Amino acid sequence: MNTIMKKTIAALLAFSCLPLSGMTAQGAFDHAQFDHVFGWGEGGVTWEVLDNMEEIDLRPYGTPPENHYYMFVDRYDLYLVRATPRDNTLFFVIRDELDIDAVTDTVVDVVEDYIPDIRERIGVNNCSFSCDTATLKKSYTEAMASAYTAFQLELSDSVENKEEIESGILLGLARKHLISEFYGFGETAHFYTMGYDKTAKVSYPIPDDIYYEWNGIEKPDFDAAEAYIKENYPDYSVEFQENEDGVRTSCSIECTGTLDYSRKLKLIFDLANRFGLMNTYWTVPSEVSGTVTAGTGSGHNKLEKKGDVTLDTDLGITDVIALNRNLMVGDPLCCTANVNADINGDGTPDEADSLAILKEIVEITEDFQPQ
């Protein structure tokens, strides 16, 4: 009997031992399970919130190279999101069924293997642990949340072995079945959202000379700015408003052609960088920023691995059992486990996916590709 035949029989025998009779999926897969609500103000969220936004390169206009800018337009307003990667931060979410306070000591034990002094300073109610090179603190996965659901580990710039720390902590937490999501260094970011006028105009007030004297700043050269706009932005016109004494009080710049929002934002940053013209914007409060998809489905979550339903970074028969229990008796799977279980990508983990995982385990397939 050849090797492929032996593997096929082994797979069918193993699969037949699992109670699949009458198995049906527990209703249609609810993609809302993928949505984690993150605040857009202070704090860190994952990069997936930016997947459907247009990135704008503002580095030629004096913005720091570590910042990334993304634009989106809704029915009323134009928004610009500044995202700064948290290159020294790990972020991981505790499983829903676990009490975060009950598993805190175990989490700290795992971290302590790589940051030996992490318990040097302990915060109130065990909410934080820190030493000279790192801080581990409880965090949230929802804006305005009232209960901790995650941890973040922040390292100082002096720590060099970040790759070893990241992989070691990931494996340590996953093998103890403590986490449902894990984001490595640079996989989360700080966000700052700015709102701008959606119209074709950009307006600048022109204060009197006393304003600049009191604030110790140089008065912008509006004439030079006007000449620059005419040469480099010919699709924009410049108009000055004056008071009854003939003194300029404001400057209006308006697009005379087809309005391009990204070009308008580049103009605003260009004039700010060259001439100190500061256009007003409003900060978007986190409580009205809406629900954004984050965390799972775009490959940033390092627990995403085809077939790994138990989220322990290994592939084994326990993954098949976990999926079958979900299909048969409704044992819950977190959003990451659902993604990992959906081998064929049809959005609904089912018995076909269970069989695909089993075939991979007994090496009938390789990387889930049919032989």
Image: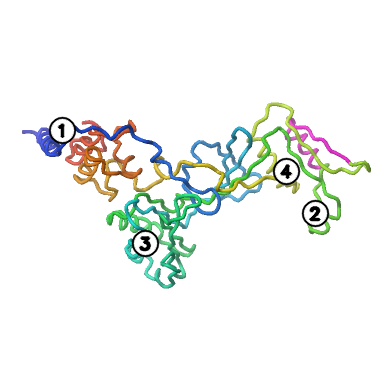
- Residue drawn at 49 percent across, 41 percent down: 292
- Residue drawn at 20 percent across, 43 percent down: 321
Among the 4 quarters of the image, the one containing residue 256? top right
Mark linked to residue 21: 1
Residue 233 within the magenta-colored segment of the rendering: yes
Q: How far is mark 3 from mark 2, CA to CA?
A: 54 Å
> Mark 3 vs mark 2: which is more N-terminal?
3
Amino acid carrying label 2: it is: Glu
> In the orientation shown, which residue stands out farthest toward the left?
1
Crowd band around label 1 with a 10 angstrom C-alpha radius: few (<14), some (14–19), many (20+): few
> In the orientation shown, which residue stands out farthest toward the right?
245
Mark linked to residue 218: 2
SS for callout 4:
helix
- The colour scheme used here is rainbow
Residue bearing mark 3: 101
SS for callout 3:
helix
Which contiguous range is marked in magenta? 224-242
Q: How far is mark 1 from mark 2, CA to CA?
A: 79 Å
Q: Nearer the viewer, mark 1 or mark 2?
A: 1
Q: Nearer the viewer, mark 3 or mark 2?
A: 3
